């Protein structure tokens, strides 16, 4: 060996990625580190084996070529080799794969293209984080550690919901979001397309739905406190997807093995549709406008509420069912997903109860309650969908008053709706708000951008979630979702901030074996993914590094208690109006807060460097927390 190649070999050994750097999310079923590494060069060929594997090979070539600057060739045979199993490997199922990386090459095998795609997502995560860069990165060695992986999902339904009504996201933003979740092996994109604040899908036979329903008056500031539309004020804040846009997004998602579940939320949450066609509601109130984020409901904290503006469709009006038939005809033609989500949540029945036609219908049909009337409505909707070859899925309120035959339930008010539906033999997707509502506050309201939220879902809380209840036939639990409502996400960057890392943690829950769950190990992997997200230009929240401050009053003394979600952080604080750092007192036990105009300022460090945000807590704030 010439000395230059000896030097080069030494260089390779030093730069070979260590096995402990492996950080795959979701955690694979089985991962065995081997000795050595595979090095990608400009000469590496990507081999697709069978024609059906070519799209995934092309996609990998494109993804590796951008940051490396290599123009990688795709041929039948290569050092990175895809293969569809001639004889299906029963362990892998439809979405599983095997991946073996050695110094000689990388082999990814699966029963179906979906499995190869998930193998690619894992392979990308084995490369250094710069591989996520959308532009060329100067880096001398691009290698992956030698490893042997067998992997397949725990659940067949792994979803993320994006609400595009409360805030509209452009077609390009929706595609980017789909890319982000595809990396974590999600396979359902639930698209919440209609709500009180905007109707976002073109329905050609009902043009006013988007001409009127996709526009609202422009407002700035805190959601829920915004001014209602003024009489005659023009609605200039508009956004919707044409049917061509929708087909383009469905195809884009399909290329990433993600199916798109459309949601048309009825009979409640329909103010945008009613603004377009006021004859569809009981009050027929022509002054109803698309809601711009102003308050129109009273919430009583026990699950009951009152809508001060009529936002529900009239279940006694045959015109409403003709309207829905038109909508669902076009939706069913556009979306290949076997289900259509019809909402069904938070429907206010107060206007129905005052309406003579609804009363007459109730008498005729022997319907006694508002819930039963909603059930009548949902069953009519289910029939419309069935006639179009689609299955119905709705939020757990569709159980109230009797579930439509064959309907699936998306359980959001805890797991109980899902459990009840599964006991009745219906399919269920679990997405309880106390675990996987990724719009909710994820850290201290004093430092989070979203200061008001009816609950908090810290990352560690989400990570506790398990979608499979005890004593239920698992065949009814299709899987789970993380749901992003966007009242508090006026920008795409904010949508990412709310989504990650929580949707990464949920990916572990929906894909990985339950036995592999390990909070500290997840955090180590998450931190490596922060580096990847930095190169990808993907926003995320570092809230899990922040201190958790609670308070108590003990023997008349106000005490502050400080904790962290992540182990091994140092907590520093001040009580003297200066900024805390590694030279101010370190927290070791509850702190007594002196009387006076005092502020407790808290920050977290690790290895001598700040990692969390500084949280300033006034004495009044701590007294409030002690109650
Ligand atoms: C919901 O959060 N209203 C489904």
Image (spheres, grey):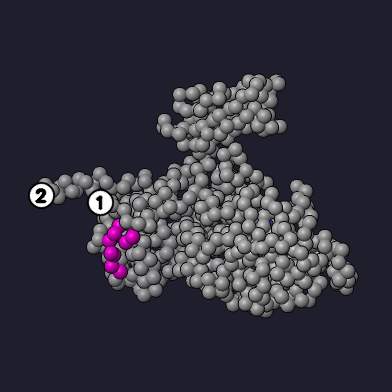
Residue occupying the far front of the picture: 232
Q: Position of residue 229 (x, y in %)?
A: 71, 58
Left or right: where 151 falls relative to 360: left
Q: Position of residue 440 (x, y in %)?
A: 61, 48
Viewport quadrant of the C terminus: top right
How many neighbours does mark 2 have within 10 angstroms: few (below 14), some (14-19), or many (20 or more)? few
Give the magenta range.
65-74
Marks 2 and 1, the one that precedes in the sequence: 2
Quadrant of residue 428 in the image? bottom right
Q: Is mark 2 within 8 Å of ligand 1?
A: no
Left or right: where 576 falls relative to 326: left
Q: Position of residue 116 (x, y in %)?
A: 41, 65
Front-lying residue, 517 or 186: 186
- The residue that mark 2 highlights is 2
Q: Residue at x 58, y 54 (%)?
A: 490
SS under mark 1: loop
Question: Which numbered marker is on residue 140?
Answer: 1
Q: Position of residue 249 (x, y in %)?
A: 51, 68
Front-lying residue, 200 or 75: 200
Q: Residue at x 43, y 69 (%)?
A: 113
- Residue 68 part of the magenta-drawn span: yes
Q: Residue at x 33, y 70 (%)?
A: 48
């Amino acid at each position: 060996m010439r000395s230059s190649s000896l030097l080069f070999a030494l260089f390779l050994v030093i730069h070979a990625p260590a096995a402990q750097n492996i950080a795959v999310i979701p955690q694979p079923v089985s991962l065995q580190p081997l000795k050595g590494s595979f090095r990608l060069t400009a000469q590496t060929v990507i081999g697709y084996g069978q024609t059906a594997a070519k799209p995934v090979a092309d996609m990998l070539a494109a993804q590796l070529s951008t940051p490396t600057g290599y123009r990688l060739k795709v041929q039948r045979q290569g050092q990175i080799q895809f293969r569809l199993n001639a004889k299906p490997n029963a362990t892998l199922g439809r979405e599983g794969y095997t991946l073996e990386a050695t110094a000689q090459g990388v082999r990814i095998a699966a029963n179906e293209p979906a499995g190869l795609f998930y193998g690619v997502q894992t392979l990308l995560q084995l490369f250094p984080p710069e591989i996520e860069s959308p532009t060329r990165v100067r880096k001398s060695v691009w290698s992956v550690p030698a490893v042997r992986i067998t992997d397949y999902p725990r659940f067949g339904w792994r979803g993320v919901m994006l609400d595009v009504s409360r805030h509209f996201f452009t077609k390009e933003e929706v595609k980017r979001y789909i890319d982000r979740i595809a990396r974590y092996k999600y396979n359902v994109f639930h698209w919440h397309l209609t709500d009180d604040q905007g109707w976002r899908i073109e329905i050609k036979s009902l043009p006013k739905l988007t001409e009127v329903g996709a526009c609202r008056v422009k407002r700035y500031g805190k959601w829920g406190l915004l001014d209602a539309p003024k009489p005659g004020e023009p609605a200039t804040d508009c956004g919707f997807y044409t049917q061509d846009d929708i087909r383009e997004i469905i195809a884009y998602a399909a290329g990433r093995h993600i199916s798109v579940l459309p949601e048309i939320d009825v009979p409640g949450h329909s103010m945008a549709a009613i603004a377009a066609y006021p004859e569809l509601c009981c009050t027929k109130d022509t002054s109803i406008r698309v809601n711009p984020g102003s308050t129109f409901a009273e919430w009583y904290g026990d699950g009951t509420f009152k809508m001060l503006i009529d936002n529900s469709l009239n279940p006694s009006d045959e015109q409403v069912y003709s309207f829905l038939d038109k909508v669902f005809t076009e939706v069913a033609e556009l979306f290949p997903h076997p289900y259509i989500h019809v909402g069904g949540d938070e429907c206010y029945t107060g206007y129905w109860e005052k309406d003579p036609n609804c009363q007459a219908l109730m008498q005729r049909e022997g319907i006694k309650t508002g819930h039963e009337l909603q059930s009548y409505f949902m069953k009519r909707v289910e029939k419309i969908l069935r006639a179009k070859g689609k299955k119905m899925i709705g939020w757990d309120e569709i159980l109230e008053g009797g579930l439509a035959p064959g309907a699936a339930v998306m359980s959001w008010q805890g797991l109980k709706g899902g459990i009840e539906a599964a006991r009745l033999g219906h399919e269920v997707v679990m997405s309880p708000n106390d675990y996987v509502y990724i719009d909710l506050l994820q850290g201290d309201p004093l430092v989070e951008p979203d200061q008001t939220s009816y609950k908090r879902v810290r990352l560690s809380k989400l990570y506790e979630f398990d979608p499979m209840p005890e004593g239920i036939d698992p065949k009814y639990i299709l899987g789970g979702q993380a749901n992003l409502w966007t009242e508090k996400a006026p920008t795409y960057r904010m949508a990412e901030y709310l989504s990650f890392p929580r949707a990464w943690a949920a990916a572990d829950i929906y894909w990985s074996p339950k036995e592999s769950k390990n909070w500290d190990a997840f955090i180590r992997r998450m931190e490596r993914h922060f580096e990847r997200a930095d190169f990808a230009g993907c926003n995320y929240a570092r809230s899990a590094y922040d201190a958790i401050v609670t308070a108590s009053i003990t023997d008349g003394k106000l005490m502050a208690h400080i904790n962290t979600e992540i182990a091994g952080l140092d907590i520093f604080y001040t009580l003297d109006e200066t900024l805390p750092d590694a030279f101010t007192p370190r927290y070791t036990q509850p702190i007594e807060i002196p009387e006076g105009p005092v502020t407790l300022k808290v920050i977290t460090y690790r290895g001598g460097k700040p990692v969390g945000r500084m949280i300033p807590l006034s004495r009044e704030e701590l007294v409030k927390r002690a109650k």
